[in-house]
Amino acid sequence: MNWFYTLVFFATASPVLCYAQLYEPLSPTEFDSYFLRVMVDSSAHGVVYQVGVNDGRSVTPPPPRLVIQRVEDGLPSYFLLAPFAKLKNDSTVIFYSSLFQHSLEHEVFEWPEGRWMHVTFPAPGTTSGVRYHPDSLPPGLPISLNLPSARGIYLYTNGELKSETGDQSEESFIMLQKTGYYFLPAPGTFYHEMDIRSIK
């Protein structure tokens, strides 16, 4: 089934992207208020917790989230990460765009083989929005076409995939302003990586 998505975009203003706020600070009191606090990683860069608010009384408690604890000058600071954030390693967090994510539990959907999509950008001067058609293949796609695995955004042109940018973030994609068939290598979606040490 081909799903249809619309991302609001205004030609005369900044695009409204689906990352929302990547993280927000928490006070020690707010951190302690979480009913569930499970440490999932600890390194010189910080401590990562999975937190939840299920107190046993909520019928549909919010999904668990990740919290980074950083210590500077002996004082702990806490940062609640946006939904669809995932720890890549002990120093890097991946923030996935919510554009193709549909899990109420904030489970991250990935496409290990990459993902095709057809995208229509609005005509200049209009505000109709960018239209996404995930899993749409180009007509006459050659079976022998080698799909790239390197990070980036690739546009299908004249039977070939051309790298448009080495970044795979939604911000970089919006800047392209080219209607056509695109291929996103694994994880098959837009994402943004951030060094844990830059979270402050």
Image (cartoon, rainbow, N blue to C red):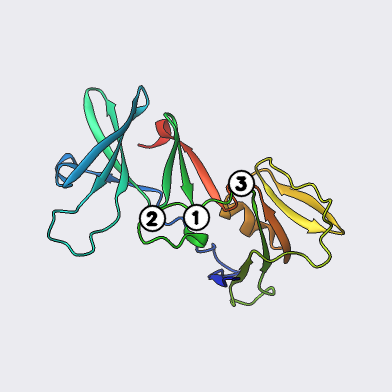
Q: In which quadrant will I find the N terminus?
A: bottom right
Look at the picture and state if 182 lies above or below 128: above
155 versus 80 height, above or below: below
Packing grade of label 1 (10 A; few <14, some 14-19, many >=20) is many
Point out the image quarter for the C terminus.
top left
Q: Residues within 10 Å of mark 3 (few under 14, many from 20)?
A: some
For the image shown, how many numbered marks are present on the structure? 3
Q: Which mark is first along the chain, 1 or 2?
A: 1
Q: Nearer the viewer, residue 165 or 139?
A: 139
* Residue 127 visible, this orientation: yes
Whole-Å distance between the Cαs marked 3 and 2? 19 Å
Disc with the residue nearer the chain's start (3 vs 2): 2
Q: Residues within 10 Å of mark 2 (few under 14, many from 20)?
A: some
Q: Which residue is mark 2?
A: 106
The kind of residue tagged 3 is: Ala
Measure how far apart labels 2 and 1 are at the Cα level: 11 Å
**Residue 62 picture location, percent across and down:** 26, 58
Residue 133 location (% of width, % of height): 63, 69
Identify the amino acid type marked 1: Ser
Percent position of residue 43, x then y: 35, 24
Q: Are marks 3 and 1 in contact (CB under 8 Å)?
A: no
Q: Position of residue 190 (x, y in %)?
A: 56, 52
Of discs 3 and 1, which sits in the foreground? 3
Q: Which mark is residue 186?
A: 3
Disc 2 residue type (three-letter): His
In the picture of the structure, the residue carrying the numbered disc 1 is 97
Outermost residue on the right side: it is 158
Residue at 17% in and 39% down: 28
